[in-house]
Image (cartoon, coloured by chain):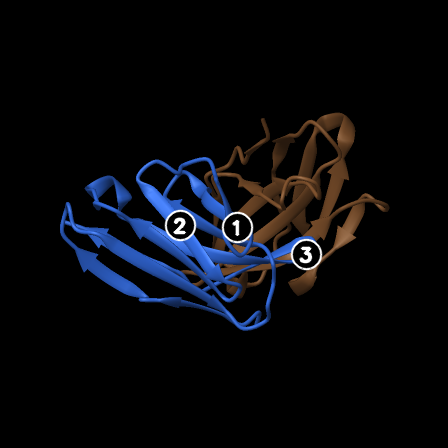
Amino acid sequence: AQSVTQPDIHITVSEGASLELRCNYSYGATPYLFWYVQSPGQGLQLLLKYFSGDTLVQGIKGFEAEFKRSQSSFNLRKPSVHWSDAAEYFCAVGGGTSYGKLTFGQGTILTVHP
Amino acid sequence: DAGITQSPRHKVTETGTPVTLRCHQTENHRYMYWYRQDPGHGLRLIHYSYGVKDTDKGEVSDGYSVSRSKTEDFLLTLESATSSQTSVYFCAIRVVDEQFFGPGTRLTVL
C-alpha cells in the first residue's frame, strides 16, 4: 500500500529564511509525487510535480523539490520565504496506472514571522 | 481555474439525515474524486469515478455512496449522517496526470 509521511506538523521560519519541508513516501512502483499548498479557507493548489527525469523539479512561487529514490524522499525547498507563503503544505504520491488515485501526507503548517 | 464547482459550500445538518454533495465540472474529464480533509489526516480518498456509472471505493468509503450519471456531475451521498462525518469535502478532477481541486464543502453534522 502506498503511504506518505510528513514528519513536521508545524514549522516556523522568519521571513527571508530558507525553508525545507520533508516528505517520505512508500510506493511499490515508480511514484508520481506532488506538493500542494492550501491557504486558510481555500482549496488546494499544485506547487510542483515529479513523474520522471531530472530529480530536481521547479515549481511555482519559487519552490523546488528533489526526488531521492534511495531515501524515498521528496523534500520541498525555498531559498527565501515570504510572509505570503504561510499556509499548509501537502505531499502526495500516486501512480499513472492506479486510476490516478493520490495518497496524501498529514500536512505541514508553515508560519512565517516578520 | 479547472472549472470545478461544489455545492453547497456550507451545510449544517443533524445526525441521521441524508446529505448529498454535488461536484460539477465543465471540461468533460473522465476521472473524478471525492476526498475528505480532517486535521492531522491530510486528505483521504472516499470514492472515485473513472467514467459514467463507473465508480469505486477509496480509503474511507464506509458510510458514503456516490453516483455519476453524466460526465459533468459526481454526487457524494451520506445516507445517514453521523458526527464523525463532520469534515471538509473536496472534489477533484484528473487532467492528464494531475489533480485539480474544487473549493470544498464544509459539512457539520450535529
SS type, badge 3: loop
Q: Which residue is mark 1?
A: B49
Q: Which residue is mark 3?
A: A63
Q: Are marks 1 and 3 on the same chain?
A: no
Task: Return the x and y of residue B69 as percentages of the image width and height.
Answer: 46, 60
The answer to whether residue B35 shows anywhere in this view is yes
- The quarter holding residue B39 reads top left
Instruction: Identify residue type, mark 2.
Output: Val
Instruction: Identify residue type, mark 1.
Output: Ser
Question: Do the residues under discs 1 and 3 have CB atoms within 8 angstroms?
Answer: no
The chain letter for the residue carrying disc 2 is B
Q: Which residue is mark 2?
A: B66
Q: Decide if residue B54 is on the left or right side of residue A31.
A: left
Few, some or many C-alpha atoms within 10 Å of disc 2 (few <14, some 14-19, many ≥20)? Answer: many
Instruction: Identify residue type, mark 3.
Output: Phe
SS type, badge 2: strand
Q: Decide if residue A46 is on the left or right side of residue B15.
A: right
Measure the alpha-carbon separation of dots 2 and 1. 9 Å
Task: Return the x and y of residue A80 as percentages of the image width and height.
Answer: 65, 57
